[in-house]
Image: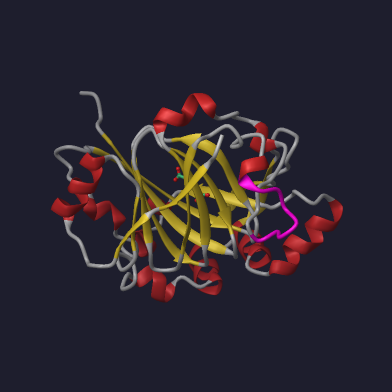
Amino acid sequence: MVQEILDIKHVNDKIGKEEFYGYIKKNEPVVFTSMAKEWPAVKKWSADFLIEQVGDKLVDVDMCKFGKFSEIQKMKFSEYCSKARDDSWSEEYSQKNRAEKPYLRNFPIDEYPQLKDDVMNESYFNQSIHNLIIRGIFLGSKDSVTHLHKDTGDNLVAVVKGKKFFILIPPNQESLVSYDKDLEIAYGPSDKKGIQIKDHPSFSKVQKLYTVIVDEGESIFIPIGWLHYVHNLDFSVSCSCWGKEALI
Ligand SMILES: O=C(O)CCC(=O)C(=O)O
């Protein structure tokens, strides 16, 4: 079997809500290269700025241990953030266990009014269709990973700092995926010695998949039901915005 690894369409023009819904209807992933470039978050959200805003709040950090169930550790936000932005922290963990790459997922931005309006992916959703919008901030150390999964809503992920690598798999390929195998072996594009997608036990049977690096100021639309795997190439900060149709 020949595996097709495809690029994701890039749209460079600024788009509005209506055009965004055109892409949702097509049910195909897209990268919007200029969507977030002017957002205050891209300009302001350095690690130091976030530490100033959030301080010592205790947060749940996923230690991303491969081959085992993930371990959640309580940590001060300030401590996590100052270690995560420093790649040597990843190195320190790497020596103990190659695959321990701490990750703070789903940090609740809505609890911080001074940060809420700095990201704007929410505004692309039409509230009369996607009447439940949920947001979460993801702060990842270099080489941290979110395992293969699918969302229950349409997702617009904006990268505010750093670079993120995505593998996307269309819903019609789902039966060919081996879930959980990516918990045992990391696929890391920055690791030249790392395993290739075609040899990775999670992805090797998939006939058609998409890969892309999403850079600072860019956003990726992940349609509902598409599987995705995410690898942070640097210390990165992103905001996921899930638009769901709430059942009334
Ligand atoms: O950025 C990430 O690590 C995960 C994002 C994601 O998978 C999601 O928003 O569903």
Q: Name the residue located 61 percent from the left edge and 49 percent from the top edge.
A: 145
Is residue 57 visible from the viewing direction of this image? no
Q: Left or right of 117: which side holds 65?
A: right
Q: Name the residue located 63 percent from the left edge and 68 percent from the top edge.
A: 85
Where residue 44 appears, x then y in whole percent? 42, 74
Q: Name the residue located 42 percent from the left edge and 55 percent from the top edge.
A: 239
Front residue of 130 and 79: 130
Q: Left or right of 66: which side holds 144?
A: left
Q: Name the residue located 55 percent from the left edge and 30 percent from the top edge.
A: 177
Where residue 193 appears, x then y in whole percent? 75, 56
Magenta stretch: includes residue 222:
no
Front residue of 245 and 73: 245
Asked where in the image residue 182 lies, by quadrant, the reply is top right
**Placement of the N terminus among the 4 image quadrants:** top right
Where residue 215 appears, x then y in whole percent? 46, 66
Q: Is residue 12 above or below residue 5?
A: below
Q: Is residue 122 above or below residue 85?
A: above
Give the main secondary structure of the magenta stretch. Answer: loop
Is residue 124 visible from the viewing direction of this image? yes
Where residue 169 appears, x then y in whole percent? 46, 39
Q: Is residue 122 above or below residue 204?
A: below
Q: Left or right of 209: which side holds 101?
A: right
Scheme of image coloration: secondary structure
The span picked out in magenta is 190-197
